[in-house]
Amino acid sequence: MSVIIITPDCFATIRRTTEHLRAQSVRDQLEVVIVAPSAEKLEADDLELAPFHSVQVVEAGHLGSVGEANAAGVRRARSPVVAFVEEHSYPQPGWAEALIEAHRQPWAAVGPVVGNANGDSLVGWADYLVGYAPWMDPSPGGVRDFLPGHNCSYKLALLLEYGPELEGMLESETTLHSSLRQKGHQLYLEPGARISHLNYENLSAWIRAQHLSGRAFAAARSEHWTSSRRLLYAVGGPLIPFVRLRRILGQVRGARQPLHLFPAVFPALILGLAISAAGEMIGYCCGAGDAVQRRWELEFHRAQYLKAHPQASEPER
């Protein structure tokens, strides 16, 4: 399996994630594809990368979006299965083995369940619920309509079929998942593959990220829509927070999450959903603008957005 990880600068940015990859039971079966501005500036540690089957450094020059960088990695990958992992996502023991085994089935994509690495932060919980409530750890496995974006695995051949559209598909993966389902493929959530996701704790940074993500998502989703359909969705924007909140409540109950936290998390959760919906309304009306590039600037170095400590703990409740 090829594991694609992006760094906007150097190896130190992805060191913690590669430590978790190195701890995988099948690390000798992993090709690690590092997408970076340049190999020289990466300053990779050869000893830390030696346990893997192989390592590639994709020199992508100036990087401006996750979709662009991940697509560059896909086109260089040499395994029939590719997995994306963010530099603020930490694969737990058994993650790689579970994904490899699941891909022996005809699933087009296999996603992990997602744990919260910010269990002592109210904003971190709100960010986690907004982004990953459908796939919370624990969650039952099975066929799903969507999987956690930027942390999924795919059959390589299916991704390559998208050609020049791949960058856009990987920027907002809900679009990719919809497309795969329309082609008759199935997506599978594998509970044996677990990751720990580091979320925002800084309220200001999180609000900006929610707005930009909402706008980028809406623009990607509506790219081929008629003007009247985009307008209809924009007008219905104020209803989006209530629809999403209802879903999140059901997902929290279904995943047996600690509901006693919910009253304290609720204000931040409502604020984040409202800001995201406002971004969607703008995206439907005006397109993405510079949202993708601005979101890229917030995507990395999550430690600077932690409120109380320089490193988040491992997930586990």
Image: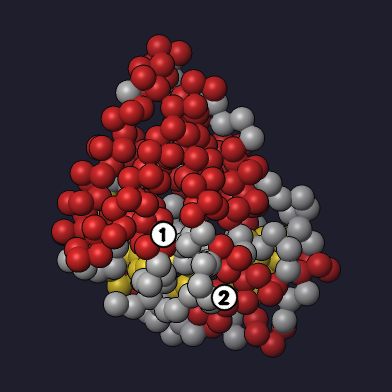
Going from N to C along the chain, the mark reached first, 1 or 2, is 1
Numbered disc 1: secondary structure = helix
The image quadrant of residue 185 is top left
287 vs 221, nearest the viewer: 287
Disc 1 marks which amino acid?
Val
- Which residue is pictured at 43% across the width and 39% down the height? 275
Q: Which residue is mark 1?
A: 123
**Horizontal side, residue 20 vs residue 141: left or right:** right
Q: Residues within 10 Å of mark 2 (few under 14, many from 20)?
A: few
The amino acid sitting under disc 2 is: Pro
Name the spot of residue 15 as percent of width and height, x first.
Answer: 62, 77
Q: Rate crowding at label 1 as few (under 14), some (14 to 19) or many (20 or more) other CA atoms within 10 Å.
A: many
Residue pointed to by mark 2: 310
Which residue sits at x=73%, y=76%?
44
In this view of the protein, which residue sits in the foreground, 119 or 64? 119
224 and 65: which one is in front?
65
